[in-house]
Image (spheres, rainbow, N blue to C red):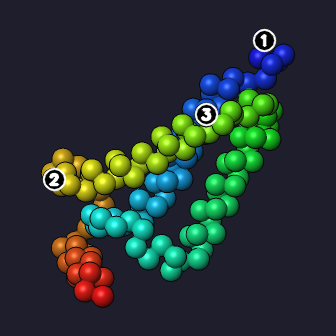
Amino acid sequence: MIEEFGDSRHFTFIFNTFVFMQIFNLICARKVHDELNIFSGIFDNITFIALFFVICAGQILITIFGSRVFAVCPKGLTGPQWGISIAIGVSSFVVDFISKFLPDWLFPKLGKDSVDDRRAALALQLQQKAN
């Protein structure tokens, strides 16, 4: 049956949603010290912007034209499926925002984050607010 109609649109939707969650998480991951404005300074790094759009364009091309090579539905996704997929991807912003207000003891400590790093990040935040 799969050989006749190609891969499932359902799995294509799941794949696309997962990738867009990761794409939007790229923006969230720019600020690691509980900084609320994840968009501050985003246009200062042209490489980040270029790669963001290349990754988005690549995902769109894979979903629309990838069929057999990437095992996605040959007919791609419908408009509403694209909208839902991207809306779920944007939910990464909501999760990131909420996690910044949760106490640190809820999250396991990974790596070495010194007190000096936190102080430097806080000083940078205060300096940005002053400007």
C-beta proximity under 8 Å, tags 1 and 3: no
- The amino acid at mark 2 is Pro
Q: Which mark is residue 1?
A: 1
Q: Secondary structure at mark 3?
A: helix
* 112 over 82 or under it: above or below: below
Q: Is residue 80 left or right of residue 102?
A: right
- N-terminal label among 1 and 2: 1
Question: Is residue 61 visible in this depiction of the protein?
Answer: yes
Residue under label 2: 103
Location of mark 3 (residue): 81
Q: Of helix, strand and loop, which one carries label 1?
A: loop
Q: Position of residue 68 (x, y in %)?
A: 80, 33
| Residue 116 makes an appearance in the image | no
Q: Position of residue 4 (x, y in %)?
A: 84, 16
Among the two numbered marks 3 and 2 on one chain, the one whose residue lies closer to the N terminus: 3
Task: Looking at the image, tell me whether mark 1 or mark 3 is earlier in sequence order.
Answer: 1
